[in-house]
Image (cartoon, grey):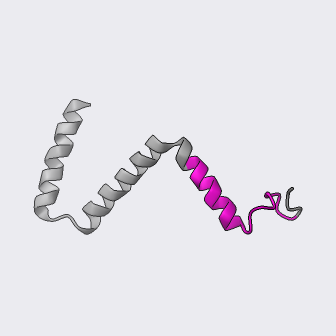
Amino acid sequence: MENKNTGRPAEYESSTTAQNEANKRWAQKNKEHKKYLSYRTYSRSFIRKLATEEDLNELSNLIEERRKML
């Protein structure tokens, strides 16, 4: 049975609950893409917030090696 005001199934108490369920379904269907996005986010955050000069030099070398492989 649908809620006439929102079109959502009546079992959802709020739009937040409905959105959380939709997010879970998307994550289940797109595991590899979600993993890629998470790793990308982690690496960018590390570089911007925590990386030392030594870390940045090492990452620069790793990036160059990776570019040669592609």
Which residue is located at x 36 percent, y 52 percent? 40
Which quadrant is home to the C terminus?
top left
Q: Quadrant of residue 65?
A: top left
- Name the residue nearer the viewer: 44 or 15: 15
Q: Which of the 4 quarters of the picture holds residue 17?
A: bottom right
Find the magenta span and give its range: 5-26
Q: Please give left or right for residue 59 compared with residue 41 in the image.
A: left
Q: Residue furthest left?
A: 54
Closer to the camera, 28 or 41? 28
Name the side, left or right, on which 14 lies relative to 24.
right
Q: In terms of depth relative to the viewer, which is nearer, 1 or 7?
A: 1
**Does 23 appear in magenta?**
yes
Exactly how many numbered labels are in the figure? 0
Which residue is depicted at the point 20% across and 64% down?
51
Q: What residue is shown at x 13% (from left), y 52% (from top)? A: 58
Q: What is the x, y in percent for residue 48?
A: 28, 64
